[in-house]
Amino acid sequence: MLNRTEGIVLKSSIFGEADLIVTYLTPDFGLLRVFVKSPRKTKSRFGSSIEPLTYAKIAFWGKEHANLPRLTQSDIVKSFHKLRDDYGGMLNIMELLEMNLHFLIDREPHPAIFRLLLATLSKLEADINNRLYYLYYKIRFLEISGYSPRLEICGRCGGLTEGRRHHNFYVSHGSIICRECIGGDDRAVKVTESALKFYKSIFKWQYSTLDRIKAPVHLLTEIQNVINSHISFINSGSKSFDKRLFLSSR
């Protein structure tokens, strides 16, 4: 069966002597892995259309539930080559791409996350060093996928976190734990009340106005530390963090 969709290339993996397995983020099929025949040969018709970050219109052939359908067509809509050519910026962008690979399940449609990534790449093309763009993507991605950290209430007693100058975010719980509930010596990330207010305000922003927002560097850094610690812990595969239990408790 022939299927058509649009997709952003997240990664390419060598398969055999001259073949590749290309992983796309698509709005219709979510994470989509396709087999690409001989793209590394000089006369390959796919060319740069299967390079990471490329946004393309694609067609693939395979049975309905085939694990690895075959790519038959790839037409570039936007290459984002300027981003690929910036080594330092590309390292930061790879963190965003890795989130899709670690958090999402193959063949589950994610149109909102697809639109988010496409908008983020477009913004970064104009200002690849804007830290707020990276943070905004991570926060929105976690929200859409159901993995947002709990920063508004204590993860144990459910008490509100407002009204205190300093808080402790415990990565093993994915939440803030109030002083009354703290037990043991789990690794905590310090976060101020001002940073939490900044975090909450981010959910009110739209990408169209994001470039006009001047975020205080110290607040940006605080929330980055919380979000990056949260993501790293989930991705670590720690036995103390069960993704299914985390999602079911939201």
Image (cartoon, helix red, strand yellow):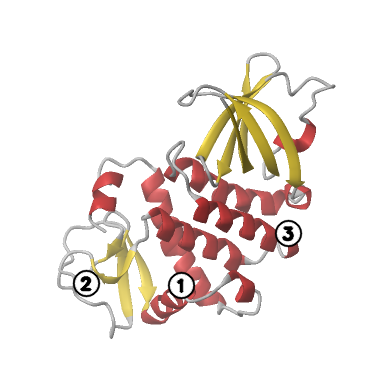
On screen, residue 135 above or below 231: below
Quadrant location of residue 128? bottom right
Of residues 190 and 140, which is closer to you in this image?
140
Residue 250 x/y as whole percent: 26, 59
- How crowded pointer 1 is (Cα within 10 Å; few <14, some 14-19, many 20+) is rated as few
Is 185 on the left or on the right of 6, as rendered? left
In the displayed orientation, state which residue is furthest to the bottom: 163
Coordinates of residue 75 in the picture (x, y in percent): 75, 38
Q: Earlier in the sequence, mark 2 or mark 1?
A: 2
In the rendered structure, which amino acid carries the disc numbered 3? Glu
147 on left or right of 244 = right
**Nearer the observer, 173 or 38:** 38
In the image, residue 177 lies at what x, y percent?
23, 67
The alpha-carbon separation of the residues under discs 2 and 1 comes to 23 Å
Q: Percent x, y for residue 28?
A: 52, 43
The reply to whether residue 242 is visible in this rendering is no
Q: Residue at x 76, y 30 (%)?
A: 46
Task: Give the residue displayed 57% in from the left and 56% down from the top.
Answer: 115
Residue type of the residue flagged with mark 2: Cys
For disc 3, the marked residue is 125
223 w.r.t. 20: above or below: below
What secondary structure is marked by label 3? helix
140 or 220: nearer the viewer:
140
**Residue at (72, 48) in percent of width and height:** 87
Residue at mark 2: 178
Identify the residue position indicated by label 1 in the image. Answer: 203
Q: Earlier in the sequence, mark 2 or mark 3?
A: 3
Q: Residue at x 74, y 64 (%)?
A: 126
